[in-house]
Image: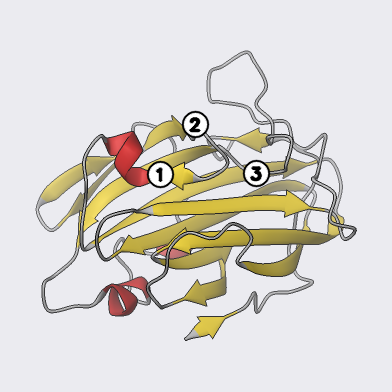
Amino acid sequence: MKKLFSAIGSAALCALSLLKAGAADALSLDPQGYIRDWVMLAPIALPDRETCAEALLKEQIKNESAVRPKTGDKVKIGGKELSWRNVTASTNYFDFNETLKSVNDHVAGYIVSYIECDQDVPDVTVAVGSNDQGRIYFNGVDIYAFTEARPLMLDADKGRITLKKGVNVIVFKITNEQNSWQGAMRLMDKAGTPLKNVKIRLSPG
């Protein structure tokens, strides 16, 4: 089952400059518009009785749509404590296993980015891909879910959002059945040109 960006034309994107918490240097989208800097929580082991597709559509952490983490924040899941941490993808997609330096099967993970805008920016194209299942919350709204197993394909699905003035929050949840565990997201204007001059933060404020 695939749901494509039900919030088309709603809340948010803008001009991007990525700003790590406590870092003096500004971050930015890569030249193709991909987000490479995130706050990550992973791996979350899933119950044996539950498929990854089922897990995708259930909360793994309380109020996952409204989560606003920063590096160092801790979450207890199934008796195990995990910490959010800042991560940077080495290429135009994010690889959980590469970041964790281990292969993780039947798991879920979250990556979060904060996008700050000086003004409302309408008609922003969000292009996404995931390996395997993926779900996106934008400013607390569930806008996208893909519940089938698949290899990563860049720009597999596209939808449009409007970035509001101020800080916008993207929560990207990805579940993995086995082997590769990846996700990719990029931001473009309505003509398909990568967004420029926009700010990305790794903390809510």
Q: Earlier in the sequence, mark 3 or mark 1?
A: 3
Mark 2–mark 1 distance (CA, rounded to whole Å): 9 Å
SS class of the residue under badge 2?
loop
The residue at which mark 3 appears reads as 34
Image side of residue 88 versus residue 200, left or right: left
Near-viewer residue (152 or 76):
152
Asked if residue 160 is positioned above or below residue 70 in the image, the reply reads below
Q: Position of residue 147 (x, y in %)?
A: 42, 78
Q: Residue furthest bottom?
A: 1
Near-viewer residue (174 or 7):
174
Q: Which colour assignment does the render follow?
A: secondary structure
Q: Position of residue 189 (x, y in %)?
A: 85, 54
- Of the residues shown, which amino acid type is indicated by label 2? Ser
SS class of the residue under badge 3?
loop
Disc 3: CA contacts within 10 A as few (<14), some (14-19) or many (>=20): many
Q: Position of residue 10 (x, y in %)?
A: 75, 70
The residue at which mark 2 appears reads as 90
Does the residue at mark 2 contact the one at mark 1 (Cβ under 8 Å)?
yes
The residue at which mark 1 appears reads as 95
Asked if residue 1 is positioned above or below residue 35 in the image, the reply reads below
Q: Is residue 66 visible?
A: no
